[in-house]
Image: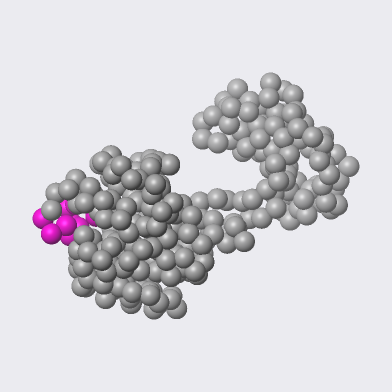
Amino acid sequence: MVAARLALTHRIGRFLGHYLDGNFIGPRSELPEGTASVRVRRYRELGQGIDSEQLTIKIAANYVSDRKVDLAAPQVEIRGLISDRLLVHHKLIEIDRSQYDLRKVKERPFFSPISLHPRYARAVVNMTGAKAGDRVLDPFCGTGGLLIEAAMLGMKVYGSDLSPEMIEGCAQNLEHFGLKADRLEAIDVGKAAEVFGEVDGVASDPPYGRSTSTNREALDSLYSRSLVVMAQTVRADGRLCMVFPRDVVIPENLVLEERHDQRVHRSLSRYYMVLRRR
């Protein structure tokens, strides 16, 4: 089920319609019986000219005027999200995001402070499009955060790292969560295609420099070289989702399908790039 894979999503709902310039646009949908609540929130600083209280009243009048209100445990929950307009949905599923905190760096027996939060690691794995049973490779696996998320989704996981210590720690972390990699190797990224053969997807967060180990190789060179090798390793139409701290040169046999920018702090931004092999 898709809800079991999601990490950055708060809830899943059925879209009911939207309010634009005070008018509701959308079909009158039937809702299940039971008590109800209506909640409206603003996305960041958008829609400052929209009166959330008045819209809450309008939504209630349109959908739940004949129902008993229960704000604590409603059987039917209508949600509104204010952006440039008000989007309305009937909440179906609340995503348990707290589960990912149980796999944070400090909860692992072997850890490095430089690691993606499990929620972002899961998102990276999801963006490869890989399914249960698919072969997923992380050529810079480090302590195994991405491989943990892929293995939890039933994928066959393969990892490599230049550091034998990291490979040992990665195996330890996987075992801690009752998981196991199909193969882990302490090798340079340039040998990945030769060692692992063809894979269905690549999920990776390469080193950013400073306290990370690059064997003194310049980052631009390492990123360029890794993309060339990953384009040889992933199957045709397979996807890579790789995280870089800067723009990179993309080989001709890879197509950039998505890019999502995340500002971490003043001196670090992450670029989540989804690339498909031609």
Taking depth in this image into account, of 23 and 251 the one nearest to the observer is 251
* Number of on-image labels: 0
Q: Is residue 215 left or right of residue 230?
A: left
Taking depth in this image into account, of 182 and 28 the one nearest to the observer is 182
The verdict on residue 213 being magenta is yes
Q: Position of residue 167 (x, y in %)?
A: 26, 72
Q: Position of residue 100 (x, y in %)?
A: 47, 62
Give the image quarter of residue 249: top left
Classify 270 as above or below 169: above
Q: Is residue 62 left or right of residue 4?
A: right
Does the image show residue 8? yes
Can you name the residue that lies furthest to the left here?
216
The verdict on residue 25 being magenta is no
Main secondary structure type of the part rendered in magenta = loop
For image coordinates 63% across by 55% down, the residue present is 94
For image coordinates 30% across by 73% down, the residue present is 184
For image coordinates 17% across by 48% down, the residue present is 221
Q: Position of residue 44 (x, y in %)?
A: 51, 35
Can you name the residue that lies furthest to the right here?
66
Classify 25 as above or below 102: above
Q: Position of residue 215 (x, y in %)?
A: 13, 59
Classify 140 as above or below 180: above
What is the magenta range?
207-216
Does the image show residue 123? no
Taking depth in this image into account, of 178 and 104 the one nearest to the observer is 178
Give the image quarter of residue 273: top left
Q: Is residue 133 left or right of residue 1?
A: left
